[in-house]
Amino acid sequence: KLDDVHHLFIAGNPDLPTVVLLHGTGGDENDLVPIAKYLAPNHPILAIRGRVLENGYHRFFERYAEGQFNLVSLNEQTAWLVKSVTELLTKYDLNTSSALAIGFSNGANIALHALLTHRETPFKNVMALHAMQLTPITEPAKLQGNHVFLSHGNFDPIVPRDSLDALVDNLAQAKALVTVFRLNQSHVISSEELQAAKIWLQAND
Ligand code: MLT
């Protein structure tokens, strides 16, 4: 039920793409709001809380261990996310196919999984901060016209370089327009990548 979806909505200019915020493991719907306000101050904001709990920490899908994902949960929760975001956008009278997903880590991972596996999602563009490949998608959705920004830390202990490269290849195979920003840092969001993300957003909004 829609009422069960923990979310936060902040109204904005409805002619601009809604920013859909998807937090990392252990976060919640409030985490990325300052980032959305910095990157896209006039856009409507819809922030979703992942409904899976791992030792009390919120996530968007289950995993067995670091880097070992429960693909059944992944597919179920991705379908839930696509449906819930679409219904919430409808409820708030917003466009249901032009949203910009901004996700960090686990939230970025599910946004890209939605894009790669669903023919229709509420997301047009995705800003994926510190995402990784969850599983290769052999027949990805057609993503011509979908822009994806990815950031990756060269010293990230969670996202090996190969994982990011495989994800980029999978998105390119789907014909998404991919921008990769690499930095010498770990699995955290930095002001440097947000500046790059803001320039990308201004070009692709
Ligand atoms: C995941 O589980 O999606 C990734 O390992 C990122 C994270 O630590 O949440």
Image (tube, rainbow, N blue to C red):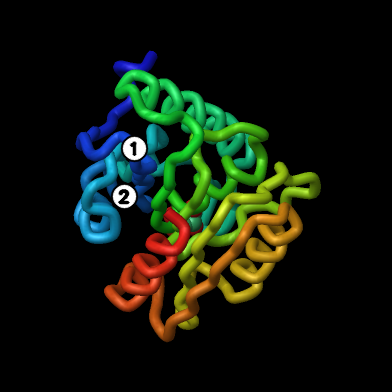
Residue 85 in the image: x percent, y percent? Answer: 42, 30
**Residue 162 to residue 51: above or below:** below
Q: Which is nearer the N-term, disc 2 or disc 1?
A: 1
Q: Residue under circle 1?
A: 15
Residue 112 in the image: x percent, y percent? Answer: 56, 49
**Residue 20 to residue 188: above or below:** above
Mark 2 vs mark 1, CA separation in Å: 32 Å
Residue 15 can be seen, yes or no: yes
Residue 58 in the image: x percent, y percent? Answer: 34, 42
Q: Which quadrant holds residue 99?
A: top left
Furthest-bottom residue in view? 184
**Residue type of the residue flagged with mark 1:** Asp
Q: How many marks?
A: 2
Number of the label disc, if any, that sits on residue 56 = none
Binning the other alpha carbons within 10 Å of mark 2 as few (below 14), some (14 to 19) or many (20 upward) gives: some
**Residue type of the residue flagged with mark 2:** Gly
